[in-house]
Image (spheres, helix red, strand yellow):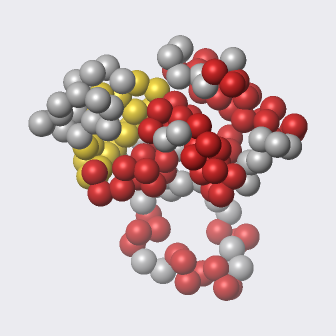
């Protein structure tokens, strides 16, 4: 990011050490991030480990030793049950379909009643699927 573009009123956000951490959140759908989604939905369940996050798996199995990771490389993986995918997969697997759409509307201003937004969402979901080669999570509505 070009710092010269930051206005004076925004400088207060850049005055502590937190600013040198990699940015894990984005408000652009195309840059959706698994860590942002994971932390929003799983909250205190996840703890930082290096540049990644680890916690007990949110999917249905007993996970006494945390084996679920949110990776900075924009995927999640569970070494207990093999769950794997990207941010859309995580969002649609952790919440109901309507809650997932509410989340996308609130955080990314994506409203699927708008045809353009729906197309954008489909493109993003399919590029995630292509990037990760995972096939188990494209919501039925978008297949
Ligand atoms: Zn698991």
Numbered disc total: 0
Q: Residue at x 57, y 46 (%)?
A: 99
Residue 68 percent coordinates (x, y): 28, 35
Q: Quadrant of residue 73?
A: top left
Question: Based on the displayed image, in which of its 4 quarters is residue 72 positioned?
Answer: top left
Vertical position of residue 90 compared to residue 47: above or below: above
Q: Looking at the picture, tell me which residue is in the foreground, 123 or 7.
A: 123
In the image, residue 36 sits, relative to residue 130, either above or below, namely: below
Q: Is residue 25 left or right of residue 67?
A: right
Residue 10 is left or right of residue 39, and the answer is right
Q: Residue at x 74, y 48 (%)?
A: 110
Which residue appears farthest toward the left when viewing the image?
64
Q: Where does residue 29 sit, x and y in percent of width and height?
A: 68, 45
Answer yes or no: is residue 60 visible.
yes
Coordinates of residue 109 in the picture (x, y in percent)? 73, 54
Name the residue located 71 percent from the left edge and 79 percent from the top edge.
7
Q: Residue at x 64, y 79 (%)?
A: 10
On-image quarter of the C terminus: top right
Does the image show residue 27? no
In-image side of 120 versus 57 (left or right): right
Q: Is residue 127 above or below residue 42?
A: above
Question: Which percent across, then down, holds residue 42?
Answer: 37, 50
Which quadrant of the rendered structure holds the N terminus?
bottom right
């Amino acid at each position: 990011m070009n710092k010269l573009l930051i206005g004076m009123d925004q400088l207060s956000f850049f005055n502590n050490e937190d600013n040198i951490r990699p940015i894990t959140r984005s408000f652009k759908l195309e840059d959706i991030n698994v860590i942002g989604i994971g932390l929003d939905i799983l909250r205190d369940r996840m703890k930082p480990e290096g540049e990644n996050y680890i916690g007990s798996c949110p999917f249905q199995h007993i996970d006494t030793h945390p084996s679920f990771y949110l990776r900075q490389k924009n995927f999640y993986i569970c070494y207990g049950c093999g769950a794997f995918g990207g941010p859309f997969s995580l969002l649609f697997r952790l919440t109901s379909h309507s809650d997932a759409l509410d989340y996308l509307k609130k955080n990314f201003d994506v409203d699927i009643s708008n045809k353009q937004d729906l197309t954008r969402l489909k493109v993003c979901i399919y590029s995630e699927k292509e990037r990760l080669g995972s096939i188990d999570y494209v919501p039925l509505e978008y297949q």
